[in-house]
Amino acid sequence: MIQVDHLTRTYGPHTAVDDVSFTIGAGEIVGLLGHNGAGKTTIMKMLTGFLEPTGGTIRIDDLEMAGNRRAIQSLIGYLPENCPVYPEMTVAGYLEYQAALHGVEAARMGALLRETLERTALTDKAGQQIATLSRGYRQRVGVAQAILHCPKILILDEPTNGLDPTQIQHMRGLIKELARESTLLISTHILQEVQAVCDRVIIIQRGRKVVDARLDELGASLRLLVTTDGQAGVDALLAQVDGVVAVEPLPAENGHRCYAVSGALAVHDLAPAVAAAMVDQGRPLYSLAPESRNLEKIFSEINMTGGREQ
C-alpha cells in the first residue's frame, strides 16, 4: 500500500530525513515513533504530497507520487500535528466543506456526515462554533475531517494530542475500528500510544530509521534473568551450562544478585537447563524469568548505541 525508498529531505545544510525506506501493507497500523524533531512530521508531509522530497521515491497504492500527486491525495485522510480549522465555522459546516473539497457527492454527504460525527463523538457539538470548543474537541474535529471521505490510507500526526484520558481511550478504539477499512500510519512521541494500538513500529532518530519491527518481535526476550544470593562463582557455573554463550552480572538488589544469561537456544529452552544446574550445585534460585523488553527499554538502548540502524 505504501512503499518508500531512500527518502531524503534537506533544508540547506540540515538533513531532516536521511535515506529512509520502508513498506506498509494494507490494513496495518504502524506507529512512526521518535523524539520531537526526529523527522516524523517531515516524512508525513512528504507522504501526503505537501512537501517535495530532496531524494528518493514514494509509491502509494501502486502510484508514484511524482506524477500522481492529486490521485494519491484523494486516497489519503490526513491529520496534521496542529490541525488547521476555521474557528468561525460550525463543526458540521466545516466537515461539509471538507467533504466537498474531497469530492464527496451531495447524495452521500448527509449520511457520511452523520456517521462521522457519531464515530468521533461530535454529534452533540455539530451546531457549535469551532472557536468555542476545547482543544480536545478541536482535535476530534481534525480526526473527523480526515476520515470523512472514507480514505484507503489514514496518516495521523499526534492524534491523541490534547485529549483527556477518556477521550484517549475512545480514540484508541476508533483507530482499531478504522483499521478494518484503512491502512494507518500514526506519528507520536508517546510510547504508550504505540503499544496500545499499533501492530508495528518504525523508530526515527535524527532523521534516520533505526528500528522497523513488529511489536511482538521487539518484545521477544533474548536473555534469561537469573536471581540468586550474593555468593561468588554463580557466573562461572552459569557459563558452563550447555547452550549458554554469555553471562552478564547485573547490579545487586536487596542482597540478591541477578545475572542476564544469553544463549544459542531460545529463552524458554534454556531455562530448564539453567534451573537444573543451579539446583544440582545447591545454589538458591529466587527467580528465573525472561528479560522484559518494552518500547521504553528499546528507546533507551537506541540512545545508548547512538541510533545505529537495527
Image (spheres, grey):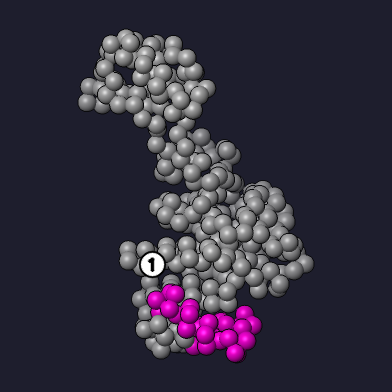
Question: Which one is in front, 301 or 75?
Answer: 75
What secondary structure predominates along the stretch shown in magenta?
helix
- Please report the residue visible at 53 percent of the width from the left and 46 percent of the height from the top: 214
Q: Is residue 217 above or below residue 159?
A: above
Q: Residue at x 57, y 65 (%)?
A: 182
Residue 76 in the image: x percent, y percent? 61, 69
The residue under the point 62% across, 55% down is 24
- Residue 200 percent location from the top left of the image: 53, 50
> Type of residue at label 1?
His
- Farthest residue in the left direction? 254
How crowded pointer 1 is (Cα within 10 Å; few <14, some 14-19, many 20+) is rated as: some
Say left or right for 60 vs 267: right
- The residue carrying mark 1 is 170
Instruction: Tell whether position 114 is magenta.
Output: yes
In the rendered image, which quarter contains the N terminus?
A: bottom right
Residue that protrudes farthest toward the right in the picture: 67
* Quadrant that contains the C terminus: top right
The reply to whether the magenta stretch includes residue 64 is no
* Residue 267, image x, y percentages: 45, 28
Q: Residue 226: where, in percent of width, then height?
A: 35, 23
Residue at the location (36% across, 84% down)?
124
Q: Is residue 278 left or right of residue 299?
A: left
Range of magenta residues: 93-122
**Mark 1 residue element:** helix
Does residue 129 show up?
Answer: no
Is residue 3 visible from the viewing direction of this image? yes
Of 282 and 94, nearer the camera is 282
Rendered position, 92 above or below 75: below
Total marks shown come to: 1
